[in-house]
Image (cartoon, rainbow, N blue to C red):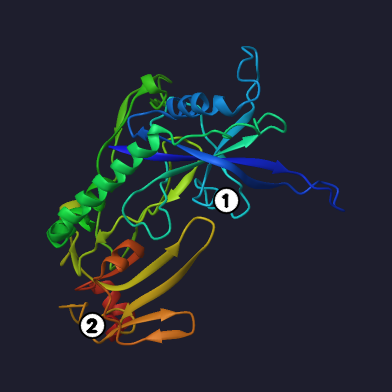
Amino acid sequence: GRLPVYVMHRKVMTPATPEARPAERREIFGLPFILTCTHHMSYQDLAEAISQSATRFDVERTNPNRKPGFTISIVNNSGTSCGACDQRKCPGCSLPKTATKLRLRSGTVPGDKVAQKVYIALDWVSGRFDEGFGENITEDTSVSQVRLLENAARRSVQARTSQDTEDRDSVFVPLTACVDAYTAPEELRKEEGNGIKCEKCKEEASAVKRLSIWREPDVLIVHIKRFHRRDDGYHYEKLDTPIDFARSLDLRPWITGPAFGSTIYDLYAITLHSGGLSGGHYVAACHGVGVPRVPIEDPATSSVWAKYNDAQVVHPWLDCQTEETARQCYVLFFAKRRPSSSNLITYGSSVT
């Protein structure tokens, strides 16, 4: 589908200050304009479309040898800060001009929970914006196109409302799928400069790398990958994909060595993270004290779960299996249902 792109104009203001370096601020002015993009477009395609539409505002639009009169930045819906990164003082990251497919963070107008939009700011060079433009302005045809798009989006969401409960399970990623991805073979191709160099012949060759579990531990800690670099290679973002973590986990399918005894694990603690890259908050949720003594039958309703948020303790905690918890879970702690005999001898009844 198409995504509306709201383009606004900004002046770069540099007032004199007592500091050695002038303090820059950006001020919104003029009338914004709207165009649309698709996820099949590249950053270069979007930059060219924006530049072509913005040429009408340039006082030197008739000069074939003119230099660019503005820079293009990705901003939030108010145009006052960045819409691509989480740096508080960033006024907006520059729109990359690469052939990489679009992966823009879309925002929503306050009060509008349906139609998503991308916000762009043009930071104009002093004197290049045509102040007389728009005296006899008429509504652009793109405005009506966006209105039709938003109305269609609302109708589509309303039609799917009755199916939300059925579709919920399909968007959750099972924890077992995460383990499968972690242990999946990875091809290292020498043609891509990612080969393996032989220590004997010194020749580079393609290879296959695979991670596996040789034997099961008594305590299993699963760290969910919540942060990754975007495809544009410039920015990082937090992933809030909901993880359907199991109350118990059988590790046997991924063990390549000899398994000693039980390979079934019970969940006994969760680390939750809320926020983004530049700031966030951690809380802990625990089942009982230490390693659970009995299998957890239903942690969603069990009264022995407690949530520790700084000095605040919520007990009993009944939100173990909610969507919010599934999106915030960062580290999962499992204990082997039947610990190894060596640990039973070392720690005695504390792990039984």
Helix, strand or loop for disc 2: loop
Asked if 300 appears above or below 211 in the picture, the reply is below
Q: Are marks 2 and 1 in contact (CB under 8 Å)?
A: no
Q: Nearer the viewer, residue 242 or 131?
A: 131
Q: Residue at x 24, y 45 (%)?
A: 152
165 to the left or right of 125: left
Quadrant of the image containing the N terminus: top left
Percent x, y for residue 216? 24, 61
66 to the left or right of 233: right
The amino acid at mark 1 is: Ser
Read off the residue under disc 1: 81
The amino acid at mark 2 is: Arg
34 to the left or right of 259: right
Percent x, y for residue 51? 52, 26
**Badge nearest the viewer, 2 or 1:** 1
Q: Quadrant of residue 61?
A: top right
Check residue 248 in the rendering and tell me which mark sits there, or answer none: none
Q: Nearer the viewer, residue 136 or 85?
A: 136
Q: Give the CA distance from mark 2 to mark 1.
A: 51 Å
Q: Is residue 303 visible?
A: yes
Read off the residue under disc 2: 293
